[in-house]
Image (tube, rainbow, N blue to C red):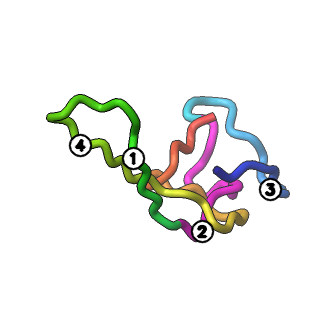
Amino acid sequence: ACWGRCQTWEKPVLEPPYVESHHRVCTYNETKMVTVKLPKCAPDVDPFYTYPVAIRCDCDICSTATTECET
């Protein structure tokens, strides 16, 4: 996961959703997919789960396609 603070000189938006689409946030810019085997799954359930892991983070524009941008 990425976390942190990005410097900005933008004025805050006081009405929902509070963040403009051009607002810079700390987000991932490189990921890798990791697969783990979940223990004690029922025999008819696929025990493998794949999820993205952040490799590198940076301050960038919040993309609603990949990130929850509301505060």
Task: Please tell me whether mark 4 or mark 2 is closer to you in this view.
Answer: 4
- The part of the chain drawn in magenta is 18-31
Residue at horizontal 81 percent and vertical 51 percent from the top: 5
Give the structural element (helix, strand or loop) at label 1: strand
Per the model, the C-alpha gap separating discs 2 and 3 is: 14 Å
Q: Earlier in the sequence, mark 1 or mark 4?
A: 1
Numbered mark located on residue 6 in the image: 3
Question: Residue 21 appears at what percent x and percent y?
Answer: 55, 53
Residue type of the residue flagged with mark 3: Cys
What residue would you read off at disc 4?
46
**Sequence order check, earlier mark of 4 and 2:** 2
Q: Secondary structure at mark 3?
A: loop
Question: Marks 1 and 3, Cα distance to the nearest angstrom?
Answer: 36 Å
Mark found first going from the N terminus, 2 or 3: 3
Looking at the image, residue 71 sits to the left or right of residue 44; the answer is right
Furthest residue to the left? 44
Q: What is the secondary structure assignment of the residue under circle 4? A: loop
Who's the residue at 51% across and 49% down the image?
67
Residue 62 position by quadrant: bottom right
Instruction: Specify which label sits upstream in the sequence, 2 or 1.
Output: 2
In the rendered structure, the answer to whether residue 50 lies left or right of residue 62 reads left
